[in-house]
Image (spheres, rainbow, N blue to C red):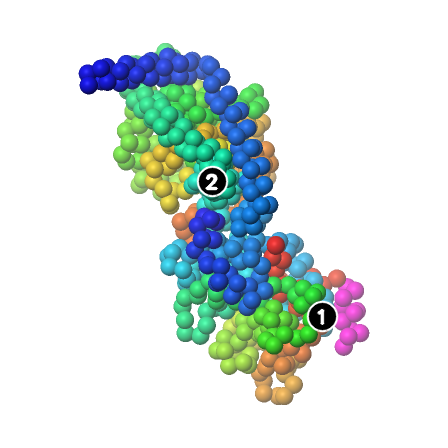
Amino acid sequence: MDDLWCVAVAIFQLWVFVVVFFIMFPAMFGLSLGVTGVYIQILVKILEWATVRIQRGRQEQSSVPVPLHTGIIERASGSMQEQMGQLRRSQPTAAGEFCLSDAMYFCKKGLESIVDDQVTQLFSSEELASWNLLTRTNQNFYYISLRLTIIWGLGVFVRYCILFPLRIALAIIGLSWLVIGTTVVGFLPECSVKNWLSELVHLTCYRICARGLSATIHYHNKENRPKKGGICVANHTTPIDVVILANDGCYAMVGQIHGGLMGVIQRSMVRSCPHVWFERSEMKDRHTVTSRLRDHIAAKTKLPILIFPEGTCVNNTSVMMFKKGSFEIEGTIYPVAIKYDPRFGDAFWNSSKYNMVSYLLRMMTSWAIVVNVWYLPPMTIQDGEDAAQFANRVKSAIAHQGGLLDLSWDGELKRGKVKDSLKEEQQKIYSKIIVGQNGIAPPETCSQRKEDQ
Amino acid sequence: MGSRASTLLREEEIDEIKKETGFSHSQITRLYSRFTSLDKGENGTLSREDFQRIPELAINPLGDRIINAFFPEGEDQVNFKGFMRTLAHFRPIEDNEKNKNPPPNEPLNSRTNKLLFAFRLYDLDRDDKISRDELLQVLRMMVGVNISDDQLGSIADRTIQEADTNGDNCISFQEFMKVLEKVDVEQKMSIRFLH
């Protein structure tokens, strides 16, 4: 019995040794032993093989469901004016007047949105083109062939029994390092050494945490990295976005003070480095928020502020409306596009379905996080442009670079209802059509109509 | 989600829906997964609130009328079959369906049924007639506050005048069909469902 115990202790010691010396220390100095790279390459090979197997399985058995990623319908395109114009062309009614068939336009639009709408999908996980050997994804095929089942089983073992404990250990080390480190640095007097140490603590912590998620991050166009005194805006998929970005530089974070574990981390971080945390009550007062951010930027030596202007996590297929608040502050905007590779694990945090801890557990039992980060050239507000237009311009740039869909819907829709003003806008467009302020029917249809009558 | 959805939907049910609505097997399973994702109460039926939660529908001026079309008189829940039956009105009319001898029951996506669907958007009290008052109410939904009562009143009067042939100051379904005789209803009331 004692022997067994000794062996167990020895194994544990060896494991800790490996974790500390082969993962943690290289991570702290930003070195890589290339293990993650090899692991990702093997994964890609396995996933490719699984895709081929599933396709073959589909040909043999008709009961295997077809992937859903093709969508349900093909939508009619064109503005209300164009489509209404088409609808009327065939009908003997004066241009710029009401006709009974007009309801069909709204009817078709409405039915299309019932069958398939852009917004509600953004708050559920992205659908994959092929199965990634995780049963939690929207389709799973581990029953197709024996070999596929074995590979899937091996995957479960590797993910839960080897990777998971390792990642938990790294996450705990990383977070306690952050809390202890920032608290200690916080006692130092204000000087350049303090800033330097604070950045070091942050950077090393995030690097360890990134290892804890087996994150492989590809940074593009590093010359555009956010500089001090600027605002970095990025699209938001998950709280991990912060870890991803902070692996390559330090940011001052803006956000609400949370309770629990997050609160402890936030409070210790602010001691060493000027993050901008708000109490819940302060957050509602837009003016306070803006003025505190403006002060931060005015001191050109402070770290760039990191803001996610969508205000909510989106499933990484699209970019939603950017709130204009952060674009009202006169400063240079450094846009950043973040795109996760969905094959290795779903990075989207569906906050209405999972709480923070269960989300992190899911992430730690996924294959890995592979993510591309693009730094875009800095942007400033142009003459004659208001904050909302500027926000849209930045959003389009991010969407274009990250290969994401550029949408104008408000992220608030995740929780709240649509604003009435959007419906009123539709009504206004339609009113213009029927009272004929801008005649929609081209002249030739008018003459046709006369012949009809 | 997709796999869970297809296990909950039995083969017999799929066949039944297929026969009634003309949707294909894969269309039915896909629409079922859409149905379950809309079903926030997770009780196998949709309520009016479930529909209203779709932002694009909530901004549709006729959104409430369209939602109403899914609910039979006096009911406030619709199950998957009922959901599919309503959607079936919007299947395109396929060429082979046109040429075939008329089936015993008229298919849900026939021109007449499509027109009836549009007609019922206006027919608020379901008495198979569109009165001036009903037309005014629906017009108001479509234009909001942008057009004055007088102007809208004259639009309604003119519309009824043009359509009404028997002089009862209402638009019957027959009259409605006559007005929309030349409209490409087959296309305007169809959604391109992917296979």
What SS does tag 2 mark? loop
Asked if residue A386 lies left or right of residue A158, the reply is right
Question: Please, which chain is the residue tagged with disc 2 on?
Answer: A
Residues beneath discs 2 and 1 located on the same chain: no
State the residue in front, A41 or A274: A41
Q: Nearer the viewer, mark 2 or mark 1?
A: 2
Residue in the image at 44% along x and 64% along y: B79
Can see residue A274? no
In percent of the image, x 29 and y 17: which residue is there? A12
Q: Quadrant of residue A8?
A: top left
Residue B75: x and y, percent?
41, 71
Q: Quick check: is A448 in the magenta stretch?
A: yes
Q: Secondary structure at mark 1?
A: helix
Judge by depth and name the residue closer to the eye, A432 or A48: A48
Dot 2 alpha-carbon crowd within 10 angstroms: few under 14, some 14 to 19, many 20 or more: many
Residue A308 picture location, percent across and down: 45, 35
Task: Choose between B66 and B112: the one closer to the eye.
Answer: B112
Q: Nearer the viewer, residue A203 or B84?
A: B84
Q: On screen, A133 above or below A197?
A: below
Q: Which mark is residue A142?
A: 2
Image location of residue A340, percent across then percent down: 50, 33
* Vertical order, A133 against A87 (above or below): above
In the image, which disc is placed on residue B99? 1
Q: Residues within 10 Å of mark 1 (few under 14, many from 20)?
A: few
Chain letter of the residue carrying label 1? B
Q: Are marks 2 and 1 in contact (CB under 8 Å)?
A: no
Quarter of the picture holding the C terminus of chain B? bottom right
Query: What is the span of residues highlighted in magenta in the rendered image?
Result: A443-453
Q: Is residue A272 above or below residue A388?
A: above
> In the rendered structure, which amino acid carries the disc numbered 2?
Tyr
